[in-house]
Image (tube, rainbow, N blue to C red):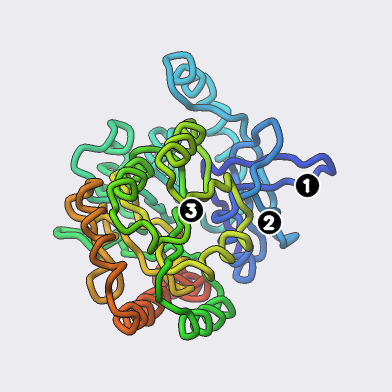
Amino acid sequence: MKLALISHTEHYKQPDGTIVGWGPTISELNHLAQDFEEIYHIAFLHPGPPPPSSLPYTSSKIKFVPLKPVGGKGIGEKLKVLLNIPKIIATTKKTLKQVDVFQLRTPTGIGVFLIPYLTLFSNKKGWYKYAGNWNQENPPLGYALQRWMLKNQKRKVTINGRWPKQPSHCLTFENPCLTEKEREEGLQITQNKLFAPPFTFCFVGRLEDAKGVQRIIDALDALDNLEKIKTIHFIGNGEKLNYYQKQCDDFGLPATFHGFLERPQVFEIYKNSQFLMLPSTASEGFPKVIAEAMNFGCLPIVSTVSSIAQYINTKNGFIVNPCTAKELNNVLKKLIVLDSKILKIKAIASHKVAKDFTFENYRHRIESEILK
């Protein structure tokens, strides 16, 4: 069986000609290659050097089909999308002739016109993956339109979380991010991890207010017993990186800003941290970094956005609700004085939750619930 995957995943060409793309998506495809004769990935090829989070394809079965990058802010960028619709549809149509099944990853700018195209003009077997917040109350117009179209068509849709009045063709699917080997290693790390101050925290994601970076800084600045915190690692990049870093310096916070890191480096920080902080109000599905961190004994300190609270509770982590700097400060004040045995019990429970986020589980569910 041959698969076509259509996404907005950013790809880059290295100096030696190797094509690399955004790590989480590429890892997923590298694992799916075990189950397909060929995989064609239609996605955007960007100019310039790739970020450290990029990975190469590890299977010769995967064929990259490049698209010219479109989308962005401003009327000019939106116009580029319209002008490129015929070419994107033509590329999709040509690729679909070479495969047996497709997956379109949404929500994305090209999803606005590819969902109706595939619904009305293609009989090819396929499914959609909606990676955003399926239950978002006031999504952007493009997201709302795509979600409405996906609710009102016959092909299966994989979504984050379980929701009231969820259509029968919309299947709750965990995003894969762990191997069975990493699960075993994570168990050993979790069992041996010490939960005594001073504690190490980490944040992984886009450095922006919506993801909770400012809330973290404000909550730490208002903490009386800061000596119980050894450091907090900020992993990721964003327009406000220098601004956040200056604030931490001015406030005397023990923060380290790493920028983008490769996956093994991020995992090393998980292994040496006791807590992951992600007090996000952004449009999340279920961030993979939460499952990755939990696998290595990092207790999650998270908001209730989207499906996050369906996996995280007081038995395996900490909920920041309402998601404010003040409430995060309250959570921090309580957890840094908790008995280490209580934190260890929470961490072991946390590690168990991550079992559903393996590539093996994902592959099995695609085979049994979608392809059949």
Residue closest to the far left: 164
Mark 1 Cα within 10 Å, few/some/many (few <14, many 20+)? Answer: few
Q: Nearer the viewer, residue 241 or 232?
A: 232
The residue labelled by disc 2 is 62
Mark positioned earlier in the residue sequence (1 or 2): 1
Local SS, label 1: loop
Mark 2 Cα within 10 Å, few/some/many (few <14, many 20+)? Answer: many
Mark 3 Cα within 10 Å, few/some/many (few <14, many 20+)? Answer: some
Side of 90 where 15 appears, left or right: right
Q: Can residue 169 be seen in this view?
A: no
Q: What's the mark number on residue 18?
A: 1
Q: Mark 1 or 2, which is nearer the eye?
A: 1
Q: Nearer the viewer, residue 291 or 277?
A: 277
Side of 210 where 29 appears, left or right: right
The residue labelled by disc 3 is 103
Residue appearing at x 41%, y 45% in the figure: 106
Q: Position of residue 58 (x, y in %)?
A: 72, 61
Local SS, label 3: strand
Q: In this view, does 168 lie above or below 208?
A: below
What kind of residue is marked 2? Ile
Residue appearing at x 69%, y 30% in the figure: 47
What kind of residue is marked 1? Thr
Q: Mark 1 or 3, which is nearer the eye?
A: 1
Q: Nearer the viewer, residue 99 or 332?
A: 332
Q: Is residue 10 above or below residue 63?
A: above
Rounded to the nearest whole Å, what is the CA distance between mark 3 and mark 2? 14 Å
